[in-house]
Image (cartoon, rainbow, N blue to C red):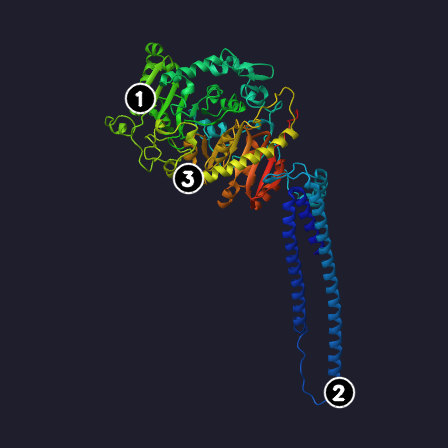
């Protein structure tokens, strides 16, 4: 028993030296641990003493009660007395021997406990001295490689002591899964009877996830810093060939300049003027002077359907217009993968059979430039979905050869298709604002009375309250007009323009059941959090990853990150704080399906967000985010009785995160301890950091290493 206790104490202090690097943590932990030792000592002592009493009380029962015989024989009486005297002496000798063994056991136990406490106090004293010179003055106290050699040696000893019982590391995925996206399996969908494009749909089957670590391509390189990386990417990082670039008829593909190892989207290119002129044309068709007036017209968020490679959104980014690209899953040459590699917002999304995972009335403008969607198919159901996610007074911009009047007149089939789309849009209460060449712009009505003024039987009906779900999560497409029952039906021209839109007033917050004090507290909290995150990560990044050859010196505010995935965004506080701190980074705000539904609030503040179930794979390609942030997500999943394991969630994080990317997890101390153990299986470099203002929570800061694929 004593050896077991000593072994357990060694493991505890080994973990302490490996994980907890703040002197306050060590000191408070030692105080707590000394109390636990005392309790264990008292428990063991009490158990031993109790057992001793039981033995003393029960001994006559085990020996049996002596029989009493009444006899007149004196010899019998003498024999009986002698026998009883002998038994009594034997009992005393046994009890004396037992007391001696008990005293020896207690002495050894006390000695071992004293040695452990002395070692703990001595270790904590020298540990405190070693870190006192490097403690930080911020809320977070940490050092990345504190006592690295000592910890490494202790860990080696610990692993030897564990032997075969040590937790097995998660294996790397096979090479063919370098672009692996769970829930998108074309061959399985075809076997299940999907066709007509539905085989590319997202289908999350039970057991479709593979818990392995996706390795990057053979010649993968870390993306260039933002904003250089927005216009120049490494060819080896994406699944596209030079032949595909040159043979494609897409305008956005022809805009690319293929160099020896890079694909360039340089603004100095003559082809880039095509996007600038195109954006200027759309602004004029809406009635604006140019695209810089989009903000004044109430346009802040754009959903770009079939975006090519994000050039339209990249051009508008400098105008503070947030454009998110969605496109179908592609097994090769993906638009979404290349757009994300440029550091621009994108995710896999399809109009083929299901509603998008966005609330109704979410976007100011929807854009489709040769996006490959036949809007006249399925009785106009795709256009109904566009109407659902479009805000009142919002715009739908469509560019297609089908719109060309001269071409349509020569082709009766094209003319028939164009007439259907035009008439259906009118029945949706869209106003045709302008039509030029191959581009047309519609404006969604701002008045609900328009729907009642339509002719009877013309166009789709209005959804009932049961059908009009504000938070659809990949539901089948509806053939009725949605969003009509939402309290958020507010025309874009009546909303505050950006950036004032992000600060909602009391009456606006009341629509979401939120008080102004709650939002203000959340905002103030994240201001501090972002400041400390940045001060914590900056020295680590610049000390551990010096400037690579060819990299330019980053200018303030040091654009270390291009994008952040916030796995439990709540009100979008992290997004707001990053923008307020003038960080050139966009945030994918994710609202879990199991948590409070504040996604409409996030979208109405002018940010981008999506609904998602973290027990399923996120619809994105591997290596697409520079940082993943999760505050309270583990507690949320724990409250749902862990519908999936922590391993499932963490392997998905690893898949989405680019090599050398960062993970910040904030949660309860107990869950962080469990997560810390799991990081070893994932091969992440991890450290636990105390939060001075909250003793019940911890930060887990991790970095994903860059494992290069070896030639086979």
Mark 1 falls on what kind of element?
strand
Q: Which residue has dot 1 on it? A: 431
The mark nearer the N terminus, 3 or 2, is: 2
Say whether residue 327 is visible.
no
Asked if residue 583 is positioned above or below residue 271 in the image, the reply reads: below
Q: Which residue has dot 3 on it? A: 516
Quadrant occupied by the N terminus:
bottom right
How far is disc 3 from disc 2 in space, using C-alphas? Answer: 102 Å
Dots 1, 3 in contact, CB < 8 A: no
Say whether residue 339 is visible.
yes
Give the image quarter of residue 211.
Answer: top right
How far is disc 1 from disc 3 in space, using C-alphas? Answer: 36 Å
Q: Position of residue 331 (x, y in %)?
A: 51, 24
Residue 196 or residue 515, whichever sits in front: 515
Q: Position of residue 239 (x, y in %)?
A: 55, 21
Other-residue count near label 3 (Cα within 10 Å), few / some / many at <14 / 14–19 / ≥20: some
Q: Position of residue 694 (x, y in %)?
A: 55, 45
How far is disc 1 from disc 2 in space, using C-alphas? Answer: 127 Å
Q: Residue at x 33, y 30 (%)?
A: 479
Dots 1, 2 in contact, CB < 8 A: no
């Amino acid at each position: 028993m004593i050896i077991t206790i000593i072994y357990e104490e060694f493991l505890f202090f080994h973990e302490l030296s490996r994980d907890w690097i703040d002197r306050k943590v060590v000191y408070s932990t030692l105080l707590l641990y000394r109390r636990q030792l005392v309790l264990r000592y008292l428990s063991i002592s009490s158990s031993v003493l109790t057992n001793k009493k039981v033995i003393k009380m029960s001994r006559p029962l085990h020996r049996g009660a002596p029989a009493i015989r009444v006899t007149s024989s004196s010899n019998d009486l003498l024999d009986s007395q002698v026998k009883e005297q002998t038994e009594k002496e034997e009992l005393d000798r046994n009890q004396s021997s037992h007391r001696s063994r008990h005293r020896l056991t207690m002495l050894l136990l006390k000695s071992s406990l004293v040695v452990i406490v002395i070692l703990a106090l001595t270790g904590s004293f020298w540990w405190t001295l070693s870190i006192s010179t490097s403690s930080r003055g911020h809320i977070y106290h940490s050092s990345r490689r504190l006592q690295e050699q000592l910890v490494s040696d202790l860990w080696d000893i610990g692993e030897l002591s564990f032997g075969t019982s040590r937790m097995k590391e998660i294996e790397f995925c096979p090479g063919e899964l370098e672009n692996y996206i769970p829930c998108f399996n074309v061959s399985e969908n075809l076997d299940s009877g999907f066709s007509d494009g539905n085989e590319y749909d997202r289908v999350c089957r039970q057991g479709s996830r593979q818990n392995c670590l996706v390795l990057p391509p053979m010649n993968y390189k870390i993306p260039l810093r933002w904003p250089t990386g927005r216009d120049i990417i490494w060819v080896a990082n994406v699944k596209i060939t030079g032949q595909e670039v040159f043979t494609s008829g897409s305008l956005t593909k022809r805009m690319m300049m293929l160099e020896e190892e890079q694909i360039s989207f340089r603004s100095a290119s003559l082809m880039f003027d095509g996007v600038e002129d195109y954006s200027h044309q759309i602004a004029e068709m809406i009635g604006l002077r140019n695209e810089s007036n989009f903000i004044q017209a109430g346009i802040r968020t754009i959903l770009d359907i079939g975006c090519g490679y994000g050039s339209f959104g990249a051009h508008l980014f400098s105008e503070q217009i947030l454009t998110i690209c969605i496109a179908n899953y592609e097994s090769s040459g993906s638009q979404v993968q290349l757009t994300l590699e440029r550091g621009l917002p994108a995710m896999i999304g399809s109009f083929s059979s299901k509603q998008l995972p966005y609330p109704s009335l979410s976007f100011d403008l929807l854009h489709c430039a040769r996006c490959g969607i036949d809007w006249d198919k399925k009785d106009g159901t795709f256009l109904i979905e566009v109407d659902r996610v479009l805000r009142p007074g919002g715009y739908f911009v469509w560019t297609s050869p089908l719109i060309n009047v001269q071409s349509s007149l020569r082709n009766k089939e094209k003319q028939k298709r164009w007439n259907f789309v035009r008439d259906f849009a009118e029945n949706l209460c869209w106003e045709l604002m302008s039509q030029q060449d191959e581009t047309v712009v519609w404006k969604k009505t701002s008045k609900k009375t328009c729907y009642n003024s339509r002719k009877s039987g013309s166009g789709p009906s209005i959804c009932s309250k049961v059908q009009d779900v504000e938070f659809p999560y990949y539901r089948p497409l509806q053939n009725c007009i949605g969003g009509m029952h939402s309290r958020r039906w507010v025309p874009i021209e009546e909303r505050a323009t950006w950036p004032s839109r992000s600060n909602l007033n009391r009456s606006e917050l009341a629509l979401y059941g939120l008080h102004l004090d709650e939002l203000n507290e959340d905002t103030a909290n994240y201001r501090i959090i972002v400041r400390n995150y940045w001060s914590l990560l900056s020295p680590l990044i610049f000390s551990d990853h010096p400037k690579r050859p060819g990299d330019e010196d980053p200018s303030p505010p040091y654009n270390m990150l291009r994008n952040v995935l916030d796995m439990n965004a709540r009100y979008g506080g992290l997004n707001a704080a990053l923008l307020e701190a003038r960080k050139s980074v966009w945030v994918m705000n994710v609202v879990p399906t199991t948590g409070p539904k504040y996604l409409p609030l996030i979208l109405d503040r002018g940010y981008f967000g999506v609904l998602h179930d973290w027990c399923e794979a996120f619809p994105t390609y591997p290596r697409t985010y520079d940082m993943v942030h999760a505050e309270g997500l583990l507690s949320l999943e724990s409250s749902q009785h862990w519908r999936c394991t922590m391993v499932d969630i963490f392997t998905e994080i690893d898949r989405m995160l680019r090599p050398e990317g960062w993970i910040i997890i904030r949660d309860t101390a107990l869950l962080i301890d469990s997560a810390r153990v799991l990081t070893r299986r994932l091969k992440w470099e991890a450290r636990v950091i105390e939060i001075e203002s909250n003793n019940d929570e911890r930060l887990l800061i991790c970095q994903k290493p860059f494992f290069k694929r070896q030639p086979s």
